[in-house]
Image (cartoon, rainbow, N blue to C red):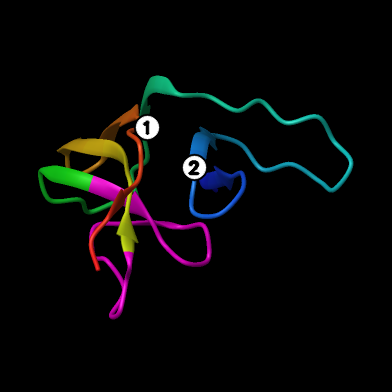
């Protein structure tokens, strides 16, 4: 899966394009395209959800937003991690 890497409070530094086991050294990436045939994105921003998953919908009551990618097609995203912004 693809997971956000959080550091500190509400800050995503990059994404993991592969699954890793605890204790493994992971490769955190910040600028790359990634395609997955199971995705159904709409063009636009992609965020990291509360459980680390990618989403295009902010959760109810969200107090910050951080764009981590942009959907270029239903199955392709351009990872481009942006700084978090406060929304509430």
- Residue at the limit of the structure toward the right, as seen here: 23
* Location of mark 1 (residue): 81
* Residue numbers of the magenta segment: 46-63
**x and y percentages locating residue 25 in the rendered image:** 81, 29
**x and y percentages locating residue 28 in the rendered image:** 60, 28
**x and y percentages locating residue 35 in the rendered image:** 35, 33
- Quadrant in the rendering for residue 78: top left
The numbered mark at residue 12 is 2
Q: Quadrant of the C terminus?
A: bottom left
What is the secondary structure assignment of the residue under circle 1? loop
Disc 1 residue crowd, few under 14, some 14–19, many 20+, Cα 10 Å: many
Q: Residue at x 20, y 51 (%)?
A: 41
Distance (Cα) linking label 2 and label 1: 7 Å
Q: Main secondary structure of the magenta part?
A: loop
Q: Tell which circle, 2 or 1, labels the residue nearer the N-terminal end.
A: 2
* Residue 76 placement, left or right of 68: left
Q: Residue at x 58, y 47 (%)?
A: 6
Disc 2 residue crowd, few under 14, some 14–19, many 20+, Cα 10 Å: many
What is the secondary structure assignment of the residue under circle 2? strand
């Amino acid at each position: 899966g693809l997971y956000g890497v959080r550091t500190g409070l509400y800050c995503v530094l990059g994404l993991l394009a592969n699954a890793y086991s605890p204790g493994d050294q992971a490769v955190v990436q910040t600028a790359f395209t990634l395609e997955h045939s199971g995705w159904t994105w709409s063009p636009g921003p992609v965020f990291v959800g509360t459980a680390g998953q990618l989403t295009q919908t902010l959760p109810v009551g969200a107090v910050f937003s951080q764009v981590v990618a942009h959907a270029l097609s239903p199955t392709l995203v351009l990872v481009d991690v942006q700084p978090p912004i406060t929304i509430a």
